[in-house]
Image (cartoon, helix red, strand yellow):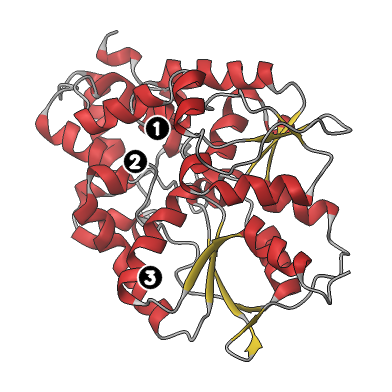
Amino acid sequence: MTAQDIFDDTQLGLCISCGFCLPTCPTYQLTGDEGSSPRGRIALMRAIASGTVAIDDPTAIEQSEHCLGCRACEPVCPAGVQYGQLLEQWRDAGWKHKPAKLRALMAAVRHEAPIRAAALASNHARKNTGAGDDYLMLGCFERILFPAVSRTAAAGFPNLTVDPDQGCCGALHAHNGSLETGEEMARQLADRLPGTIVTTSGGCAAHLASVIGRDRVMEFSEYTAQRLASRDFASIQRNGRTARIAIQDSCHLRNGLGVADEIRTLVRQVGTLVELDTAGDCCGAAGSYSLLRPDDALRVLEPKLAEIATSDVDIVVVVNPGCYRHLRTHLARDQGSIEVTHIAELLAEASASPSSG
């Protein structure tokens, strides 16, 4: 592959360097460095494409790694640049020497057998034959770390078919420099789950939709809001009051697929929604980012932690396992009384209440 073949020329040419992306970019906000903004990184991509800068130039490698890939720049871009697509192409060409930790994660989910073996002891959703053509996707790490998510999702929708032998969707690979493998894994999962795929991970939803089509993918809050919009959920109680609930959006779900209102509709049905100013900002988890660059990830998260601490919230609800792990880890350390839960678990609690219909 030559430098000229790395990027989609159409996308690369769309950027008009207007700077609308700068206020939305977490790494630019941290550093104030133009090179750490989408506009600056696209300028670097153009230099790589022209052969002026080598793909393995240390600055190029650092900037491709420093980016969280949150895609917050996309909704505000007047030219419609699909920055996330360009970033994946950049990493696919440039990340030839991946950190050992990342290689281990990618190897662990490349095939179905290791995922199934690792999840044997977890109480995640097991085989269920639904009545229709809707399939519940079992997140690869989610079924190990947060098994109650798939279990409560399946319990809430008996029509969902659960295939316990399914593999990974490939989002981890696509976002981390193995784009072809990530797309191949998405197609393999789509063949295994031939109907509508319902996923409890916002990042996986965006990746799957980009490969197999938006019409075949639904994120869980989107699926639930369409089907249970009129359901009479019970109010969740905390500390002698209706629970005050904040939301952490999934970046790929909000910025890539435009799904954000649905979770808010659901939260309002079970508690008091506390809309954080930082709800749509990246929490710093960003897939494997918080594992590979933990200091940067925590710096991104700190403003959100500060806002949560002053918002008198009881629960922070998420729609992505990476956000779940990152927020739970740091809120437990700093604000031990505040719970973090997935929207599927939250709705299961409301449904289990004696007063729910």
- Residue at 63% x, 28% y is 164
Q: Is residue 351 above or below residue 285?
A: below
Residue situated furthest left in the rendering: 58
Quarter of the image with the C terminus in it: bottom right
Residue at which label 3 appears:
304
Q: Which secondary structure, mark 2?
A: loop
Q: Which secondary structure, mark 3?
A: helix
- Residue at 22% x, 26% y is 98
Mark 1 crowd level (few <14, some 14–19, many ≥20, 10 Å Cα): many
x and y percent of residue 344 in the render?
66, 56
One can see residue 330 in this view: yes
Q: Quick check: 120 left or right of 292?
A: right
Residue at which label 2 appears:
288
Residue at which label 1 appears:
175
Query: Which residue type carries mark 1?
Result: His
The disc at residue 92 is: none
Q: How many marks?
A: 3
Q: N-terminal of the two: label 3 or label 1?
A: 1
Query: Which residue type carries mark 3?
Result: Lys
Viewer-closest of 46 and 227: 227
Alpha carbon separation for disc pair 3 and 1: 24 Å
Q: Residue 298's quadrant in the figure?
A: bottom left
Callout 2–callout 3 Cβ contact below 8 Å? no
Quarter of the image with the N terminus in it: top left
Mark 2 crowd level (few <14, some 14–19, many ≥20, 10 Å Cα): some
Viewer-closest of 4 and 16: 4
Alpha carbon separation for disc pair 1 and 2: 9 Å
Q: Quick check: 5 left or right of 200?
A: left
Alpha carbon separation for disc pair 2 and 3: 19 Å
